[in-house]
């Protein structure tokens, strides 16, 4: 590997972490279900969602590069009301998103390794191990581990998709599903798009990861390098979403097979998608890879909320400008560890209540996240077009218009969902 390639690989970080958390419930679960149920009919809708959410996600990387701070500081410049809105949204999603990806990971682990333990016990082990790794290893471990896990999954997924292409019914490709679209279809689309590619508030995590990466490298990256890292993760997540839709369409669409509602049963079906494409020999390998990648998704999810909590507590406690680096680091670790423990315990309670149905956990998490998406996108737009951003770092006129159109589209879709759910 050349020194230039090595340097680029080393500089990658927040974008890959973004891709890792995107591959969780949205790709492995929802994209595969979309392909199995609708064939290729939802691909255009997925593309539109990626385009609509693009500015909001990009602004996380762009803000961190321009200011050396996270988006939460940008929210603070807007007023404490903006911080309060984020806190409410975080509290509304944190105990839905992490349990969802943990349950998928536990199911995969049981299917791949033949574990006989209860899925709740497996989930608890995954969360506890993740918590220990993050509190001990910090960002450096997260950054290095996820890169290699993602590289392996991408390779395996691309190969499996190429092999399943002859089995796909290409006539299902359309702008929208054919036939009568009922309320249940809309509900599924909202659940699919809520986590596609991920929750919009992950843009805040992206900015926090960028700040952490800057500490590792000695300074923030150039805008060009920051956006290059972001685009690798964002475009990579989109291509993986297409791959999982095609896997579901090629192997399960048009058959009588329905996804099982329990985590272990669904995970077994997911591994079978690869086995039917690559052959029986691939089962153990794919199972292990899928578990490893979903484990990285749990790691990133379990890191994001506590990392945001550290920043929020420092802002409200007036410790954000501490000059004593040693004292600041000690404070950060204490808040981070506390937030991790709270998140693990809360997630286990949710899993205890809903452990019997993977689809319920994922769909509820996805829907909550989708309904909050326009609000975060709007806040990100305000931050990036404010006077606190240098003129040369502000979004172009075209990107501003795309941001506004995306906010309008997300708001309209959310409003339509609420109309169907509570009025129609």
Image: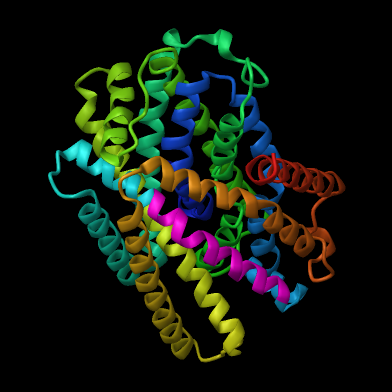
Left or right placement of residue 392 versus residue 41 in this view? right
By secondary structure, the bulk of the magenta-drawn segment is best described as: helix
Task: Examine the rendered structure and indicate whether residue 45 appears above or below residue 290.
Answer: above
Q: Position of residue 273 (x, y in %)?
A: 33, 23
Q: Quadrant of the C terminus?
A: top right
What colour-coding does the image apply? rainbow
Task: Examine the rendered structure and indicate whether residue 334 appears above or below residue 34.
Answer: below
Residue at (24% x, 25% y) in the render: 282
Q: Position of residue 219 (x, y in %)?
A: 57, 68
Task: Examine the rendered structure and indicate whether residue 73 appears above or below residue 325.
Answer: above
Q: Is residue 411 visible?
A: yes
Q: Quadrant of the N terminus?
A: top left
> Magenta span has 88?
yes
Q: Is residue 295 visible?
A: no
Total labels: the figure holds 0
Q: Which residues are magenta?
A: 81-100
Left or right placement of residue 173 versus residue 20 in this view? right
Q: Nearer the viewer, residue 54 or 179?
A: 179
Q: Nearer the viewer, residue 243 or 346?
A: 346
Residue at (68% x, 44% y) in the render: 54
Left or right placement of residue 3 versus residue 42 in this view? left
Q: Position of residue 175 (x, y in %)?
A: 68, 20
Give the farthest residue toward the right.
397
Left or right placement of residue 65 versus residue 301 in this view? right
> Magenta span has 138?
no
Residue at (43% x, 23% y) in the render: 248
């Amino acid at each position: 590997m050349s020194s230039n390639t090595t340097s680029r690989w080393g500089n990658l970080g927040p974008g890959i972490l973004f891709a890792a958390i995107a591959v969780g419930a949205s790709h492995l679960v929802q994209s595969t279900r979309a392909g199995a149920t609708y064939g290729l009919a939802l691909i255009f809708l997925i593309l539109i969602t990626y385009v609509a959410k693009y500015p909001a996600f990009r602004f996380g990387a762009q803000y961190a590069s321009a200011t050396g701070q996270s988006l939460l500081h940008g929210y603070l410049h807007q007023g404490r009301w903006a911080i309060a809105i984020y806190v409410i949204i975080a509290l509304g999603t944190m105990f839905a998103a992490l349990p969802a990806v943990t349950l998928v990971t536990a199911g995969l682990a049981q299917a791949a390794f033949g574990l006989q333990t209860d899925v709740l016990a497996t989930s608890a082990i995954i969360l506890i191990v993740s918590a220990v790794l993050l509190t001990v290893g910090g960002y450096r471990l997260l950054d290095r581990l996820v890169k290699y896990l993602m590289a392996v999954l991408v390779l395996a997924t691309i190969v499996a998709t190429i092999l399943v292409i002859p089995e796909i019914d290409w006539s299902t490709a359309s702008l929208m599903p054919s036939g009568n679209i009922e309320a249940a279809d809309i509900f599924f689309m909202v659940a699919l798009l809520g986590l596609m590619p991920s929750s919009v508030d992950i843009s805040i995590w992206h900015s926090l990861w960028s700040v952490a990466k800057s500490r590792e490298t000695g300074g923030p990256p150039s805008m060009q390098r920051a956006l290059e890292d972001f685009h690798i993760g964002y475009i990579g997540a989109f291509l993986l979403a297409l791959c999982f839709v095609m896997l579901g369409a090629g192997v399960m669409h048009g058959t009588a097979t329905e996804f099982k509602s329990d985590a272990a049963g669904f995970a077994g079906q997911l591994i079978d998608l690869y086995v039917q494409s690559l052959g029986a020999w691939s089962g153990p390998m794919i199972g292990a890879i899928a578990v490893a990648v979903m484990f990285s998704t749990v790691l990133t999810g379990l890191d994001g909320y506590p990392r945001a909590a550290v920043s929020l507590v420092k802002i409200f406690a007036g410790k954000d400008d501490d000059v004593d680096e040693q004292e600041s680091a000690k404070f950060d670790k204490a808040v981070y560890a506390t937030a991790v423990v709270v998140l693990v315990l809360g997630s286990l309670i949710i899993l205890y209540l809903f452990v019997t149905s993977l689809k319920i956990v994922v769909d509820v998490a996805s829907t909550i996240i989708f309904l909050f998406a326009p609000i975060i996108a709007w806040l990100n737009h305000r931050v990036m077009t404010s006077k606190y951003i240098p003129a040369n770092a502000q979004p172009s006129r075209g990107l501003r218009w795309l941001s506004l159109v995306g906010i309008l589209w997300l708001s309209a879709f959310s409003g339509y969902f609420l109309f169907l759910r509570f009025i129609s």
